[in-house]
Image (cartoon, helix red, strand yellow):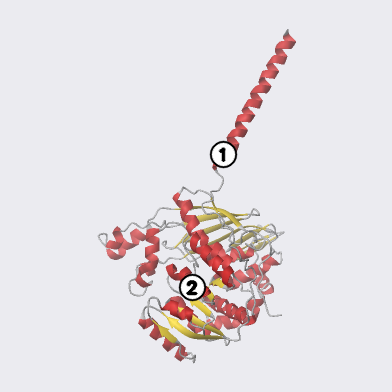
Amino acid sequence: MKKSLALFFYFAIGLTIIGLYSCKSRDYKNRKELFTAIEVFKTEPRPAGQSHVLELRAEPLKEVRIAIIGLGMRGEGAIHRFSYIKEARIVAIADVVPESVERAQRALDSLGSPAADGYTGADSWREICERDDIDLVYICTHWDLHTPIAVYAMEQGKHVATEIPAALTIEECWQLVNTSERTRRHMMMLENCNYDFFEMATLNMAQQGLFGEIVHAEGAYIHDLRFLLFDEESGYWDMWRLKHNEKKDGALYPMHGLGPVAHALNIHRGDRMEYLVSMSSGQFGLTEYAKEKFGEESDYAKRAYKKGDINTTLIKTAKGKTIKIQHDVTSPRPYSRIHMLSGTKGFAQKWPRRGIALEPNGHNYLSDEDMNKLLKEYEHPIVKEVGELAKRVGGHGGMDFIMDYRLIYCLHHGLPLDMDVYDAAEWSSIIELSQISVANQGMPVKIPDFTRGSWNELKTVKYHYKE
């Protein structure tokens, strides 16, 4: 009798444990399903007749004839830089502000460059794209025109380089990808930070395995722009950038921090960004600044700015890597893009302290002397080639010139560009995807595969040279 009771007791305990485990398993399964990243935008199938443009090569151009559309801060600087590249010639310039066109003409003259045809009409970019004596359309307008001009230019047979962001929505990202694939024209986003000297050296280190397997990376755009956002005279034309901060909340400008680390992680050349989560702080800085500058009863002070002061976006890749991107243009903070790479054998970071740490002493930064020796040893071949000239020409310390130099070099020799349309689409897609995540309490959101499954055909980022 006692033996039977004991057996029954143990049997009951066993059933209870099995039941609890089963409930726990079902609960875990439900939680897993609940927190799966949401596919808000599906990866579109490739239209018939199209193929990918990974490492696209186009016909070499003896001389690259350029039209610059938009002559504000970025466009005017490009005129100066192109004057140092003998294979480049500016043949057309355009801006809706006539004084900007006149100023650009004077700049061309002072640089000893031939005069360019000037345009001031709001839609004159269409006429420019239709010309048969232009090879490259270089877009420096406000953000909303980047995709429309880029798409139309490619449809007219032109290569395109556009200031960042290349697109504002997922729909625009697909427009860029499909048009480039269909027309076989280059479409590059002008991400200058990929060409900064420290970023290029650490890319070289990463590609040579100095950091081991890179597990995590961070980037940012932390730049106090309040004085420009509210400057009606010398700030952004028609206050266009302030309007974006008024209407949207998310990572509105992720490319500067994301571009360099995406190349170090070989995004769409062996790995891909799979999903993100994004969160923003409340909005305080713009309202406070507007009250102090214009008064509490001013229109600017009473506006409801949607953009939270600080946005943080986390990205997970298909191969298990993580990326953190921050955006803040309204806080009184020192400028920073962070640029941090963390691997199994080493670490590098540019801001707030520039430093490198390596095994077997990863707990401590290298001395400045040892770090500078290492940076010299791993100086990128492009910097060795043109770095000193870049410093003299300028443009954010020289990285802008290296960007333009490489663009013209690759078009001149018929080589793949350093950055392609998939870079432009992937990095720009974070803008809308982060807004969706922020609006839904940090909901995980899937990132479309703009290569449509071709992301693993290449194994590393490659900056091409003439053989």
Label 1: few (<14), some (14–19) or many (≥20) C-alpha neighbours in 10 Å: few
In this rendering, which labeled residue sits more in front, label 1 or label 2? Answer: 2
Measured from the top left, where is residue 78 in percent x and y?
49, 80
Which of disc 2 and disc 1 is earlier in sequence?
Answer: 1
Residue 364 image-quadrant placement: bottom right
User: Residue at left 57%, top 88%?
Assistant: 86
Give SS at disc 2: helix
Q: Which mark is residue 31?
A: 1
Left or right of residue 266: residue 148: left
User: The N terminus is located in which quarter?
Assistant: top right
Give the amino acid at mark 2.
Tyr
Residue furthest front in the image: 48
Residue furthest right in the image: 3
Where does label 2 land, which residue? 152
User: Residue at left 57%, top 64%?
Assistant: 339
Instruction: Establish if 176 lies above or below 108.
Output: above
Marks 1 and 2, Cα distance to the nearest angstrom? 46 Å
Q: Which mark is residue 14?
A: none
Which residue occupies the foreground of this view, 176 or 279?
A: 176
* Res. 324 in view: yes
Q: How many marks?
A: 2
Which residue occupies the foreground of this view, 200 or 319?
A: 319
* Res. 352 in view: no
User: Residue at left 29%, top 58%?
Assistant: 302
Measured from the top left, where is residue 133 in percent x and y?
52, 85
Label 2: few (<14), some (14–19) or many (≥20) C-alpha neighbours in 10 Å: some
Residue furthest left in the image: 297
User: The C terminus is located in which quarter?
Assistant: bottom right
Which residue occupies the foreground of this view, 417 or 228?
A: 417
